[in-house]
Image (cartoon, rainbow, N blue to C red):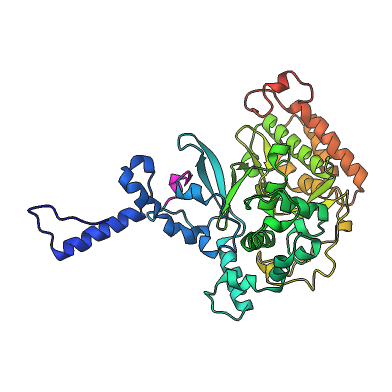
Amino acid sequence: MELQQLPGTAIPPLGWLTLLLWFSARSCAVSSPASLAPSLVSQVRTSYNFGRTFLGLDKCNACIGTSICKKFFKEEIRFDNGLISHLGLPPDYLPSYPANYSDDSKTWRPVEISRLVSKRQNEISDRQICASAAAPKTCSIERVLRKTERFQKWLQAKRLTPDLVQGLPSPFLRCPSQRLLDRVVRRYAEVADAGSIFMDHFTDRDKLRLLYTLAVNAHPILLQIFPGAEGWPLPKYLGACGRFLISTSTSPLQEFYSAPPDQAADLAYQLLGILESLRSNDLNYFFYFTHVDAGMFGIFNNGHLFIRDASALGVIDKQEGSQAASGSRTNKDIFSCLAGGCQAELPTCDTIPETQSLRLVCRQLLPQLLQGKFPGPVQQEIDRALAECGESALPEPPVLRAASGLRDLLRPLRTCDPRFAYRYPDCKYDDKF
């Protein structure tokens, strides 16, 4: 912008400097475009130059993707005002951020902006990448990763095969089938044209972003290939920008530990139902958790419970069979260490019991939700079922029976009212609720 001197006025040299600094400060402030004159909107949007480093865009294509960046730049994704600092950005040490999302700049809905790993772990990984190439600390992360043997194999590949993901640390990739990997390629949302099991439509950049995502945390991939719109218990994937994922917002399960009895019964009933659908479903995939905590499950504002964090979710193909990652020790490389777990050894596929997730949830989550909530005799039956369901020494059939009996106990304890919008008013007319 050119500064013009008004007729009859004189601006001393320091005055020009003051004005320039003032305009620079204005261009770095973040405000809603609706509250500004049109001529200043472009200045506000340049504030996202600050955000390139915050979002991780400066590290692309060693990032998740860029499919939703335009919404950041158009301010159709806004961090909650309480997070914003004087520089217009929230604190950079949080794992996730509440935000609002709009398709028309008039109606807004809550979303969550999440890191796949902590900022500190990203910094450690980036330094490790540079060190692996004997490069300075500020090397080009992308250039180093492109030169690796693994990525060179990806460049030549027409199809994503199990050998290309061997040694990556995610439980999702521990024992992948070809059918599962084809589903990844066909539904990968960060490419312009998906739908084929072959990677002909992938650019080199697309392949690096997919490999990086799978290496760091497969959570966004699971959201894409098993979408909630098809009945899978996962929040909606809205896109990625740099090293951030944007998905629909949920409240973590631990916020409901003090919920009233009918709501606690409803959430526990839903959680047991989710575990059953992960164990047995029409696509013949067996999903299991390597560990659980209350932050992995979330509740939408309509009362519906979903898997909030799928990073600890493993998948075994019961239809095609899984190709175990034999030789995973020898297939470890820099991509095996980007999430900090390159030394960890996961159990083999054939040692995962179908009741693993049930036992974990019955031991670690459901007692926190259900203990001391119900009249004496009912509470005693619930506690007994929880103890059997979480017992590691019991064989699988008694554990499955205990979980089924627990669901039967919980079903009539749920109420049918508008607080549970995900099943109201259907529950008034259908006995299955």
Q: Nearer the viewer, residue 76 or 277?
A: 76
> Does the stretch in magenta take in 36?
no
Q: Is residue 295 left or right of residue 331?
A: left
Q: Residue 12 at what x, y percent from top left?
A: 13, 63
Give the residue displayed 67% in from the left and 32% down from the top: 263
Q: How many marks?
A: 0
Residue 314 in view of the camera: no
Please state the extent of the stretch shown in magenta in the rendering.
76-84
Q: Nearer the viewer, residue 278 or 387?
A: 278
Give the residue displayed 89% in from the left and 57% down from the top: 350
Residue reaching furthest to the front: 200
Residue reaching furthest to the left: 8
Q: Quadrant of residue 28?
A: bottom left
Q: Residue 86 at what x, y percent from top left?
A: 37, 54
Q: Residue 305 at what x, y percent from top left?
A: 68, 38
Q: Quadrant of residue 430?
A: top right
> Does the stretch in magenta take in 77?
yes
* Vertical order, 145 against 420 (above or below): below
Give the residue displayed 69% in from the left and 34% down from the top: 264
Q: Nearer the viewer, residue 219 or 57?
A: 57
Residue 119 in view of the camera: yes
Where, quadrant-wise, is the C terminus in this rendering? top right
Q: Residue 103 at what x, y percent from top left?
A: 51, 38
